[in-house]
Image: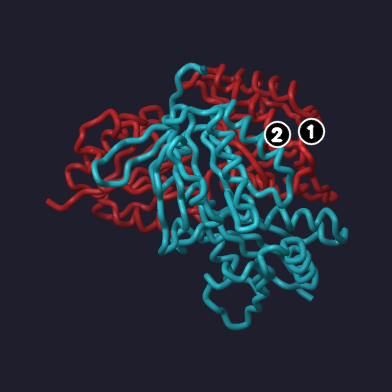
Chain colours: A cyan, B red
Amino acid sequence: MSRGNLRIVGLGPGSSAWITPETEAMIAQATDLIGYAPYLDRLPETPGQSRHASDNRVELERASHALSLAEEGRHVVVVSGGDPGVFAMAAAIFEAIEAGKPAWREIDIEVSPGITAMQAAAARCGAPLGHDFCAISLSDNLKPWNLIERRLAAACDGDFVIALYNPASKARPTRIHDAFKTLRARKSQTTPVVFARAVGRTDEHILITTLAEADPGIADMSTLILIGSSETRVIARGDAQPFVYTPRSARRSP
Amino acid sequence: MSRGNLRIVGLGPGSSAWITPETEAMIAQATDLIGYAPYLDRLPETPGQSRHASDNRVELERASHALSLAEEGRHVVVVSGGDPGVFAMAAAIFEAIEAGKPAWREIDIEVSPGITAMQAAAARCGAPLGHDFCAISLSDNLKPWNLIERRLAAACDGDFVIALYNPASKARPTRIHDAFKTLRARKSQTTPVVFARAVGRTDEHILITTLAEADPGIADMSTLILIGSSETRVIARGDAQPFVYTPRSARRSP
């Protein structure tokens, strides 16, 4: 039996123009593709390749399934959106390895980095991530809300640009309002804020506003929110969408 | 005269397998390529395409040159390593636009996201960026050191995974030691630390250690350092390189 392997890849935020050649090559060599159905649906069918589509909420099950197939000698590719290493499937697979069979530690595993939502959102409006920044998931499915609040406060204290992932879902529509309350208490009301929805998809929408004027209620699971640092600037361009950027330089710390 | 444009792209950290198709297409359509010479050297020569190589320290000059050429009707691509939006050329170009001629605001400009060093470094050792993280440049060429110290402290307070860019150069060999002093005073000594050097290049080297045992003196300008959160874990694998990952879940905030 040939030796199996496991590749963990990400398709970027929506456009196939952001899928790296490394990821393309890994997918082409797979005997088995595993992933949340909408990600697999983005890939053309290949004869002889098996597809194992799953629901979004069963990451650990999906990870164990992938590891078992690789152990059996299959060439398995686990497909995420974005970067598989950023709020996506890679961490779930290593969790499953740590908790699972000792033999899983010997599987040939590679992770291929991908374009994550904040990078695509930033590119669409200028260069808001041009200087020190942080990324925080607002989902409290797997971590306590007080840790999220603590991280938001620390991000304000450090004057980081902030990328907010998973800002809201049907199951937790109010947390995004709590988060904005924390941000508004600690940052200038004129701080630039970007709501980037469905970046790279046909229904892409970018809204550039300020912390005072932002309506956090417009965010959904397809939205990535960027909150500026005290240095982040907006360049007006008449009727065209403004540019948002964070300079490479910073004044003395307040 | 045809209308010029400006595209701002990144080649990723070293391997051409990480250059996105969008970036490839933009480069193919350029009349003029502008960038730091080692990045341009990574691209094959194309007949009819002009190259404008420059030194590393003249970002604003390079930005103004690119904008002037685009204004003249050229199809200009500014080439960075990594993601042009993350500690790279995109911010410098928007700085030049804000300070420059009003006509520059009307240039057709697009940024193409790329794989940045922390993503490639993370992929090589597992999934250390699997949960909330921040990215900090340790270069104090353009910002005061006390702001960097403040950001390191905030990153510890928020228990973020930390990616350190530009950890050391010949001109500032000691700052990395100051940074580790701050980190050691505020984080567990067993925190996993990864030194990822020249990722994607033939001389790539990954070192996985702990905050107590790390020798910050080994870092240079080609090194990306990852510092774990309190949740980041190491999975031993006998003689093979261990996996490092940060779980999707977190215990109650300390």
Q: Are marks 1 and 2 in contact (CB under 8 Å)?
A: yes
Image point (79%, 29%), residue name:
B188
Q: Is residue A240 above or below residue A250?
A: below
Mark seen at residue B159? 2
Image quadrant assignment for residue A199: bottom left
Q: Is residue B199 above or below residue A56?
A: above
Image quadrant assignment for residue A89: bottom right
Mark seen at residue A232? none
**In the rendered view, does B42 fall on the left or right side of B164?**
left
Q: In the rendered structure, which amino acid carries the disc numbered 1? A: Pro
Which element carries disc 2, helix, strand or loop? loop
Determine crowd level at label 2: few under 14, some 14-19, many 20+ residues with C-alpha closer than 10 A: many
Determine crowd level at label 1: few under 14, some 14-19, many 20+ residues with C-alpha closer than 10 A: few
Q: Is residue B202 visible?
A: no
Q: In the rendered structure, which amino acid carries the disc numbered 2? A: Asp
| Of A18 and A135, the residue lying toward us | A135
Q: Is residue A142 above or below residue A180?
A: below
In the rendered image, which residue does mark 1 sit on? B254
Q: Are marks 1 and 2 on the same chain?
A: yes
**In the rendered view, does A230 fall on the left or right side of A106?**
left
Image coordinates of residue B84 in percent, x first then y, are 43, 42
Image coordinates of residue A128 in percent, x first then y, are 44, 38
**In the rendered view, does B245 fall on the left or right side of A254?**
right
Label 1 marks a residue whose chain is: B
Label 2 marks a residue whose chain is: B
